[in-house]
Amino acid sequence: MIRSTLSQSAKFTRRLALGLAVATALSAMLPATSVFAAAKNSIVIGMGGEPSGLDPTVAAPVFIGQVTWQNIFEGLVTIDRDGKIQPQLADSWEISEDGKTYTFKLHEGVKFHDGEVFDSAVAKSSLERARGDASVNPQKRFFAAISSIETPDATTLVLKLKQPSGSLLYWLGWPASVMVGTKSAETNKTIPIGTGPFKFVNWAKGDKVELARNMDYWNKDVTVALDKATFRFIPDPQAQAAALKSGDVDAFPEFGAPELMASFEGDARLGTFIGNTELKVVAGMNNAVKPFNDKRVRQALMMAVDRATIIEGAWSGFGTAIGSHYTPNDRGYVNTTGVLSYDAEKAKALLAEAGYPNGLSFTIKAPQMPYAQRTSQVLQAMFAEIGVTMTIETTEFPAKWVSDVLKGANYEMTIVAHAEPMDIDIFSRDPYYFNYKNPTFNEIIKNVELTADPVEQEELYQDAQKILAQDVPALFLFVMPKLGVWDKKIQGLWENEPIPSNVLTDVHWEE
């Protein structure tokens, strides 16, 4: 009896030991991300696309800022989660009465991750690089009003302007305006070095970017909870959902499959979060070529579009209809969706008036992203109802689209989500891919910058929206929401997106 008991005990001990050994072996084989997530001092963020580089001051794709802005790089000022301007590397500033002199007092004791000291000379160098003749900054226009930069002392930076620039302070908070060091500026594309709360560790192309907490972060008023952050790039929506459900990814702040959002309902671990963005989905037309150089054709196509059906078919009902290049989040917003509302019969009549009684045909260059493909397919069916044949040409984004459409204007119609906040001024840029020219509109946009009065600016923005809604240089469709899915214990991620970003400063795991 004793022998039997000892035998059973020995067997149990062996089973326990074997179980522990297997568990240890499995643990060793688990991805590092899972181990880190269990430690509750790290996070794995999923993204639908990989950045082309890691320096937001030399290229425009939003994926760059979504990894680096406020994590690695910081600006003189920043934009908070409510879209408000806040001090950052500049503690304070003063603007002269004529709006042409900005004096910034810089924070002392700030160092870049490589040890370079941040002061007014470095800030001047960073801005000169952004605005100079050789600049490749995607938002070079932000700095066009600056005539000279002065550095009276190490903590004082003075910007002298040619004329008032009502949006300058806001623009200085954007990813394209972050401060870069004199020693690291040229290599930031692959090895980003900033002043932020996280340092760059590694970029495994096609897979992930890894960051680690900056233990010497200058802002002692900020408590950073995460020791490690990993951005994993998963373009396929089904794979995104699988990674979330398996725990390989802790959060997908911009989940790419609205039709799969319902699959997370009732999940004990994962929550869904729907917020606002600035992602305006528009079908741009080349206003310089037939038939789109005729406003009546553009108006007819707009009236052939039922926006509610577009939103349902393209993004599973998630989205807000817009009638101009402006979102309900933006100050001075006017609902212009009723200016050229859906009316297929009126659309046919207007086409006939423009000389196309038997319809017309053209090609849309549509990026491969799901929203663009789905929206194009719904538009194709709607246009067919008024006798218009639209051929869909899938165009690789960003490289081919940027080359053909954005830079070459070699297209008839295209579709893309414009992510920049308050970017209604793109229709006044010359050149720009819409090839839209309206002197009255241009004058309104110019006047926005000549005043710092927010009431005056809002009235001007309202006038600009009304002109675009009537002229229709692009088919204004809908604003995409921010569809987030993440572990319910994660706190501090931004639910709304005033700037395309994944700010990690306040992110932590709930105990």
Image: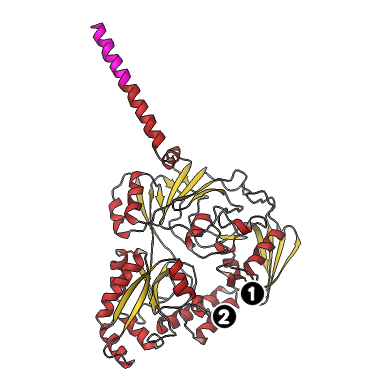
Q: Does residue 340 appear to the left or right of 175 in the view shown?
A: left
Kindly identify the amino acid type of the residue bearing the numbered disc 2. Lys
Query: Which residue is at 33% across, 22% downward?
Result: 16
Quadrant of the image containing the N terminus: top left
Find out whether residue 3 is within the magenta segment.
Answer: yes
Crowd class of label 1 (few under 14; some 14 to 19; many from 20; radius 10 Å): some
Q: Which residues are magenta?
A: 1-14
Secondary element at tag 1? loop
**Residue 113, x across and y down, in percent:** 62, 49
Secondary element at tag 2? helix
Q: Nearer the viewer, mark 2 or mark 1?
A: 1
| Residue 81 seen anywhere in this rendered image of the structure | no
**Residue 426, x across and y down, in percent:** 50, 76
Residue tagged 1: 145
> Looking at the picture, does residue 298 appear above or below residue 194?
below
Residue tagged 2: 446
Answer with the quarter of the image where residue 471 lies. bottom left
Separation of marks 2 and 1 at Cα, in angstroms: 12 Å
Find the residue positioned furthest to the top.
2
> Looking at the picture, does residue 45 appear above or below residue 473?
above
Query: Which residue is at 40% across, 79% downward?
Result: 285
Q: Nearer the viewer, residue 105 or 483?
A: 483
Crowd class of label 2 (few under 14; some 14 to 19; many from 20; radius 10 Å): some
Quadrant of the image containing the C terminus: top left
Query: Which residue is at 43% across, 64% downward?
Result: 277
The answer to the question of whether label 2 and label 1 lie on touching residues, with beta carbons closer than 8 A, is: no
Q: Does residue 212 appear to the left or right of 24 in the view shown?
A: right
| Residue 409 seen anywhere in this rendered image of the structure | yes
Find the residue positioned furthest to the right.
152
